[in-house]
Image: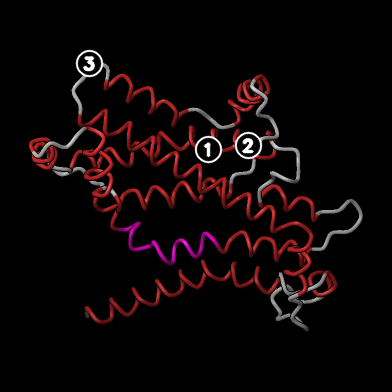
Amino acid sequence: MRRIGYFFLYVSLILVALFQVFPIIWLFLFSLKDNREIFAGNPFALPESIRWENYLSVWEAGIGQYFFNSVWITAVAILFTLLFGSMAVFVITRMKWKLSKLVLGLFMVGLMIPIHSSLIPLFSMFLNVNLINNPWSIVITYTAYNLPITMMILLGFYYTIPREIEEAAIIDGASLHRLFFRILLPITTPILSTTAIINMIYNWNEFVFVNTFISSDRYKTLTVGIQNFVGQYMTDWGAIGATLIISVLPILVAFLFFSNKIVEGISSSAVKG
C-alpha cells in the first residue's frame, strides 16, 4: 500500500514539474521562430527552421549592454543589502542597547510600504541630488527596499548562534570588527546565500524603478530594454522571445547551483525553541 502511495506521489510531482518547465520550453521554441510561424502556424509546433539569428540580432541591437547593466546593478545592490543587513542584525541581536527594538520595528515598517507610493518622493529626492538617469539611484533603491526582508530572514539565524562563540573570540582578543567579519559573517553563509537569491530575483526582474528613473539606453536593464524591440508598426516577436530567454537564464543558473544552499538556509533560519 505504501508503494502505491509513493507511486502516485512521484507521478504527481513529475506532472507538476512538467507543468512548470513547459512555459520555458515553449518560450525557447518561440524564440527560434519568425513572425509568420508565430501567428500563422501552430503555437505549440516545433520551428520549421531554427533561427539562431534571433539571438544574434538582439545581441547586436544592444541587448548585451542591457544584460551587463542588469548584472552589475543586481550584484552591487545584493552586496550592499547583505552587508548592511548583516551589520544591522548584528547590532540589534548581539548588542544591548535601549532602542534596539524600536530600530528593528522601523526597519520592519519598510515591508508595509508599497512600491508605487514611493515613486514620486524618490524621484523628487534623486532629482534634487542629480541622480536621475544614473544607475546608482537604482542601486540605492534596491538596497533600501530589500533591507527589511533581508533582515527578517537573518534575524532567525542570528538568534540561533551560540553566544559562547563570541565570548571565546573576545577572550582571545578579537576586536568588534574581527568578530563580525571573521567569525559571524562566515557562519551565516548559508542564510546569506538564501537572501542573495531572493534579492537577485527581485532586482533582476524589477521594472518600475528602472523605467521611472532611467531614460538613457546606456543605463537601462533587460526588463526595460525589451521595450525597444516593440515597434510602432512592426514587432519582431522572435527577437523578443530570444531576449526573454537571455533574461531568464541567470535566474535558472543561480537556482541550479544554489538550490541546496537555499534549502539549507531556510531550514537553518528557524528559531530554535
Of 182 and 149, nearer the camera is 182
SS class of the residue under badge 2? helix
The extreme right residue here reads 233
Q: Is mark 1 on a helix, strand or loop?
A: helix
- Answer above or below: position of 60 versus 47: above
* Magenta stretch encompasses residue 88: no
The amino acid beneath tag 3 is Lys
3D distance between C-alphas at marks 3 and 2? 36 Å
The residue tagged with tag 3: helix, strand or loop? loop
- In this picture, residue 48 sits left or right of residue 92: right
Residue at numbered disc 2 = 209
For residue 129, the mark is: none
Using the rendered view, name the quadrant where residue 126 is placed.
top right
Task: Give the x, y percent position of residue 212.
Answer: 69, 34
Q: What residue type is labelled 2?
A: Phe
* Residue that mark 1 sits on: 142
Scheme of colours in the image: secondary structure
Q: Where is residue 3 in the image (x, y as percent from the top left)?
A: 25, 81
